[in-house]
Image (cartoon, rainbow, N blue to C red):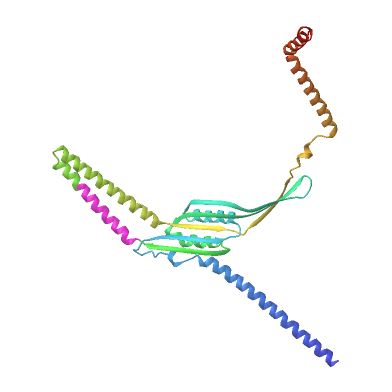
Amino acid sequence: MKTIAQLGLTTLVIIALLFSCKKADSTSTADVANYESTADSTAVSSSAAVEKKDSKQKFIRTADIKFKVKNVVKSTYAIENAVAKFGGFVTYTNLQSNIHDQIKTKISQDSTLETTKFSVENNITIRVPNTQLDTVIKSIARQIDFLDFRVIKADDVSLKLLANQLSQKRSTTNEKRVEKAIDTKGKKINDIMEAENALASQKEANDNKTIEHLSMQDQVNFSTVTLQLYQNETIKQEITAGEKDAAYYKPNLGIQIIDSLKSGWYILQSILVFFINLWPFILLSLGGFFLYKRYLKK
């Protein structure tokens, strides 16, 4: 009796240990999955996307992110909605399916099972307000199932913007001086033409600097984000009407015999008509034969 009690106690201890190990293992697995999900969604965020309100520096920010999602189409719609929500816009999107393999299996006399293996991907380019870049990236992070890479750049263009402004001022001043010189001192035609050409060149240089400054300011105000979305290979199966053999569409033997008799009769008619069309030659041949027999042979 004592031995049975000891065995029962030992069994209970072993079961308790196994249960606790299994629970710890499941907890550990859940923690790892939780950590990976959190890591993927926070890894795309960066301090390079944050600008201080009182900062005098001007940055051109760009981001390049590649990641896997559960469903490319649904994630594309979610990203487009998030971009529009925070004042951005989509400048390029290329959503497409790539077929890797296609197999047709005949499952009955008139049905075929078509199996298609394909993957869906999308390349998106978006422009978002500079102040909303970090918010938009965090919204995009919710779609990430696996992050391949993310590259975020912040180029300081403060001095370049200042240089453009100073260059514009100099060009404007020179332009005014040339205009004044033309109005007050230009007398000869040749001098006036040379001055006008110089003024046109000065205006063109000033316009180019203005456009360059506006372009750079636009890049500062709106950051460019390039996204590459993809998903796991998908298999699609559908049943389609099977292609029948050519022999399936042939008529039965009786119809073939009737068609053959008709064809033979038509051929015979054609032969008779052909010979009837040759009656002058046949008549001349017969006449020549009789003349040969009657006269030439004697």
Residue 162 is one of the magenta-drawn residues:
yes
Residue 117 among those drawn in magenta: no
Find residue 256 and report its horizontal and vertical position in percent.
82, 31
Numbered-mark total? 0
Residue in the picture at 19% in, 44% down: 179
- Looking at this view, name the residue that lies furthest to the front: 298
Please name the residue shown 72% across and 13% down the image. Answer: 281
Q: Taking 175 as reference, is 126 left or right?
A: right
Quarter holding the C terminus?
A: top right
The residue stretch that appears in magenta:
157-176
Give the vertical position of 109 relative to 75 (above or below): above
> For residue 30, which quarter of the picture?
bottom right
Name the residue at 31% across, 49% down. 208
Q: Position of residue 267 (x, y in %)?
A: 78, 23
Quadrant position of the N terminus in the picture: bottom right
Q: Position of residue 220 (x, y in %)?
A: 39, 57
Along the line of sight, the residue nearer the viewer: 297 or 109: 297
Q: Find residue 190 and report its image quarter.
A: top left
> Residue 244, position in %: x, y?
76, 42
Magenta span: chief secondary structure: helix
Residue at image position (78%, 88%) is: 9
Q: Is residue 25 left or right of residue 258?
A: left
Q: Give the image quarter of residue 217.
A: bottom left
Q: Is residue 175 above or below residue 165?
A: above
Q: Is residue 109 above or below residue 149?
A: above
Q: Report the residue that reaches farthest toward the bottom.
A: 2
Above or below: residue 196 compared with residue 254: below
- The residue lying toward the viewer, choosing from 238 and 132, is 238
Q: With 185 as the anchor, is 285 left or right in this view?
A: right
